Amino acid sequence: MHKHDNPSDVSPEDGAGRGRGRGRRGPGGPGFGPGGPGFGPGGMPFGPGGPGPRGRRGGPFARPGGWQQADLPSADDATAWFTGRLPGDWFVGTPTITIDREEILVVGELPPVDGEDSAAAAEGRIARFREQTRSERMAIADAAQARYGRKVSWGATLGERRELFAHLAVPVMTRLRQPQRQVLDTLVDAGVARSRSEALAWAVALVGQHTEAWLSELREKMAEVDKLRAQGPSL
């Protein structure tokens, strides 16, 4: 049995971290630099690197999508940091730590309840862990967010039960042509999803489930490229 709290439940009381503020208004207007809309200092489009993909690090050598990581601290050592920072009696073994651009999700397995393995006992044990560790999880989340620039969310498992506490649901904007919209509408009409947005989330989950090995290899290759780029000469 799996249970998830409301995806929009990101109350700071569960250590989900503090929200990042919106960008400051520059002299050129909301969200822009001195050069005016779409231009950086000196009037060059997309910043000093010249024309290129969106973001400050434009130019002919920028990897599409790589600009989104430009302003984020590296989280390569996050698993080791959490392993050293978390109290040793919280979880059985090493917790599972999942990282993306917005969030670090920490999910650990709780020690079993003595003499009891029912679903009700698991639910109660997870609830007790959540209440008893809240203040310490908040402190760890604040330290991790300052270090890695991402919100920290938590979860726990016990037996077949898995619960996520406060965690992020990040909106992703996209444009779909009619054949793609028809796929989503078919899922909605069939009752698989309640809305197009839910149908899209379902489709993404299905793709991830069936292509996990390929996605994992792709992430590894991208990480290698990023490391090589970081070792290159500065221009």
Image (cartoon, rainbow, N blue to C red):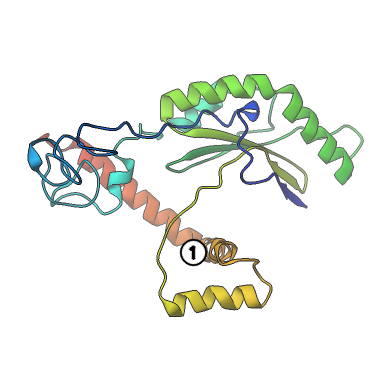
Q: Position of residue 73 (x, y in %)?
A: 35, 31
Q: Give residue 122's quadrant in the image.
A: top right
Instruction: Using the image as rendered, state which of residue 108 and residue 150 is in the foreground.
Output: 150
Q: Position of residue 175 (x, y in %)?
A: 40, 66
Q: Which residue is at 27% across, 40% downward?
A: 227
Q: How many marks?
A: 1
The residue wearing badge 1 is 211
- Assess disc 1: are there few (<14), some (14-19) or many (≥20) residues with their C-alpha within 10 Å of its C-alpha: few
Identified by mark 1, the residue type is Thr
Image quadrant occupied by the C terminus: top left
Instruction: Using the image as rendered, state which of residue 45 and residue 226 is in the foreground.
Output: 45
Which residue occupies the extreme right position in the image? 115
**29 left or right of 15?**
left
Considering only vertical position in the picture, is 144 above or below 69? Answer: above
Considering only vertical position in the picture, is 77 above or below 60? Answer: above
Q: Which residue is at 28% across, 39% downward?
A: 31
Q: Position of residue 8 (x, y in %)?
A: 61, 44
